[in-house]
Image (cartoon, grey):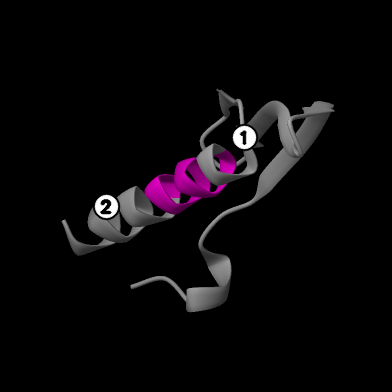
Amino acid sequence: MKNEEDKGTFIVHINSRQNATWQGEVVWADKNKTMNFRSALEFIKLVESALDSTIEDDVL
């Protein structure tokens, strides 16, 4: 199993800030995947789901 500190590397680009939240894209560097988000909450959910899938991959 991977070390807890080595879950993933993300690059975050904030394109704008509207309605008191962020819009932009996040690049999951380890998997070379780019995902767009429309709010800070959506960003957190994207990162969380990416990390959850990493944990599931380690178990399988």
The x, y position of residue 23, in whole percent, is 71, 27
* Amino acid on which the number 2 mark rests in the picture: Asp
Q: Main secondary structure of the magenta part?
A: helix
- The segment highlighted magenta reads 43-50
Q: Residue at x 76, y 39 (%)?
A: 20
Task: Examine the structure image and report whether residue 49 is included in the region drawn in magenta.
Answer: yes
Answer with mark 1 or mark 2, whichever residue precedes in sequence.
Answer: 1
Residue occupied by mark 1: 39
Say which of 24 and 22 sits in front.
22
Quarter holding the N terminus is bottom left
Dot 1 alpha-carbon crowd within 10 angstroms: few under 14, some 14 to 19, many 20 or more = some
Q: Which quadrant of the figure has residue 26?
A: top right
Marks 1 and 2 sit apart, C-alpha to C-alpha, by 27 Å
- Amino acid type, residue under disc 1 in the picture: Ser
Q: Is residue 13 magenta?
A: no
What x and y, as percent, mark residue 58?
Answer: 28, 60
Q: Is residue 46 left or right of residue 28?
A: left
Dot 2, crowdedness within 10 Å: few (<14), some or many (≥20)?
A: few
Q: Which residue is mark 2?
A: 57
Could you say which disc has been placed on residue 13 in the image?
none
Residue situated in front as seen by the camera: 60 or 24: 24
